[in-house]
Image (cartoon, helix red, strand yellow):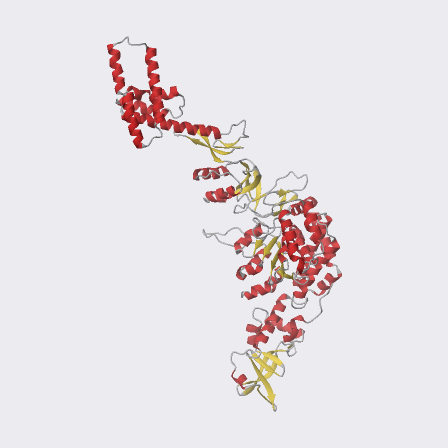
Amino acid sequence: MSKAASDGFRESADSGLEGEAVNHEAASILPAIDGGAEANSNEGAAESDPFAGSAEDHAANETRRKIELFEWADSVLGLNETELELALDDAVKRFGMQRRALKRIIAARRSEKLKAKAKEERSRTEPRDNENNVKYYSPDFKVSDRGVYARKFDDQGHPFWDRICTTRIDLLALTRDRREENWGTYIIITNRDGGRKKLAIPHALTAADKVADIASLLASLGVGVVPSKQARQLLVQFLTLEVPERITAVPQIGWHCSGDAWLFVLPDETIVPGGFDGPRPVLQTASLHVQHGLDVSGTLEQWIDQVAAPLAGNSNVHLCVGTAFAGPLLKWAGEPPGIFHLWGTSKIAKSLVGAIGQSVWGRPKVPGEPDAFGASWTATAVGLERYAVLRSDVGAYFDEIGEGAPKVIRPAVYVLANGSSKLRGTPEIDLRPMESFRILGISTGEPTIEAYLSSGGEKVPAGLKVRLVDVPAEVRPESAFETCSADGIEELGKQFYPLTLQLHGATGRAWLQHLVDIGSEEITVRLRRHREEWLSLPAVAAVRKTATAQVRSILNRFALIAAALRMVIEANLLPWSIEDTDLGIATCMMRWLKSRKGRLDVTGEMLGAIEQIRTILAADLHGRFIHQRLIDGNLDYANPADATKRDTLGYVKNGRILVDPTAWRSVLCAGYDPEKTARHLKNEGLLIADDGKLQHQEKVKRGGDVVKARFYVLDPKILDDAAGTGPKEASL
């Protein structure tokens, strides 16, 4: 074959990428056929016989030969190397061509077949603008009911549309917060079953090389992500395209103002007053949340009839359901956040009570159930903060405090109650943005918060006991339900666990719609009225009259729960009576008071200090105090061992406990105010002191000498009931 003929074949093969018709293919390979030995033979025949045939006959013969050659080349495409060599031997004789030329024809035919097949596949998958609801978001991306497409170019620079996602994704708007920071894209996805879901994609994720994470999360929502690296990269590029619309993004769910109206933002929707047509903010968190635990299943009417109505008259149910409804009221109540901890022995149905309360907002936390409303105390501190962001102004539920780590739970309670995440740095030595939230919650577990944290070596200050309030769950022997004995607990669980898994979330959405419809001013007015009415109940008022500020703070939280239940009943969202729920919350309050150590008019810190003094005295009164007595008018050691005691805290003499001032400050009152503690005990008649002072001078024997010294002198009655003396608590 001549060089010119060879070059001519290479050019035409490269230029014939899209050829499909036989005539076109024949033209592209024509020079290769002209360069063989048989072509030279035909040329010699023509010179010897110029009148051998017409031009039409020559063209027809040539076309037939090309067709035969192409058919032969197509027939050998699937042969292995040995079979191909044998076929080439026959073809050299049949077509009178060189093996090299025949191999190039085979390669060209293979390339054309593959490109024709690719073009056909693209033609089948590419949407038709007039048939598939196509929308162009840029010259390089378009969306149809068949998915998301990116514009690409083939080897010859010809454009074609390649599918990068098999389900539809529409870009609704770009998001940013009120400071015009934290940008993202608000999208609506259509999953494989045709369901639709809205969510915001933070641009911080797309810019942080989180392509695989974003694609994975979208796939978990039913998005048909094409499983290739390039498709995933193009999909993330598509999610950051410029669109003209703008939406305000907020970092946590809950109440947010838009113009003159207050709206309630949830992960999957924004609840607005009837007739509202202003801007609607949407949730956009630092990470992409695909599960939020605020699902809706069943109807409001079904929940009222099948869950709430049969459980009337149970105080723990009132507390848990009321806490769930009180979450959105916390903003308007002027009260700090906090948690009620229902504690008691196992198998009394504490978790069932919690499941009923959770069903107001979503699927209860039950073993084996995904995307639950509640969380476990086993979570990390950061995990609990992330959970709080998704529960702001709604409420929270924490299960099994005994499974968590005391060193995590203690600071977590403060974080949840204070309403803001910890201040943290970044690897770039910068500060991460702090996140805020408002949380009212329920916790359950066998031990009290104080007992559990103390067992883990954690100190339990009074402030923590105000934020997380221990409420005994047992209302009758081995049962947390007034209407169900211990024998019926198992059947009660079999009835209501499945019901709460089937019927949940609708009541909470209806409650939010009611609140946004009546508006913030009316919420505040009604809330104040109902709280005052509950606090005016005789039993509650009697407690409040003598209570310290700490006790009143907890009473106000109970009042908020009672007021929430009253408002929900007025909105016809609960089948219970106000009298029933008022009594139920007051009963829970009384159980808390009875389990609380000490008087209502004594602060938690003072109760803690006195309890610490009693504990130390009970443990060390014989081992670390020197006992002395008068023998024949002379002061001496009560026992020979007293003369050699070391590391002592003071003396016991004439029925009094003499505490060394240093030991009083550093041991007995460690962590508390020693002067305030002494003054309180003096006022209670449990500390003997000189006029105008907190100490008393006493004679004691040291070594062989009797000396005078000053001590904090305690009456032994402090060991009996120092922290519990005083006015009795009111009763219902």
> Taking 137 as reference, is 438 above or below it?
below
Residue plotted at (56% across, 66% down) = 454
The residue lying toward the viewer, choosing from 509 and 60, is 60
Q: Quadrant of the N terminus?
A: top left
Residue shown at 27%/9% (left/top)? 50
The x and y percentages for residue 208 are 46, 45
Residue 376 x/y as whole percent: 56, 55
Q: In the displayed structure, does residue 161 sit left or right of residue 414?
A: left
- Furthest-bottom residue in view? 632
**Residue 483 in sight here:** yes
Give residue 24's quadrant in the image. Answer: top left
Percent of width and height locating residue 386: 55, 51
Name the side, left or right, on which 695 lies relative to 312.
Answer: left
495 or 717, which is in the foreground? 495
Q: Residue 108: which quarter of the image?
A: top left
Tally the numbered discs: 0
Looking at the rendered image, the quarter that the C terminus falls into is bottom right
Instruction: Answer whether residue 527 is visible to the viewer in this image.
Output: no
Q: Is residue 580 left or right of residue 649?
A: right
- Report x, y in % for residue 611: 61, 70
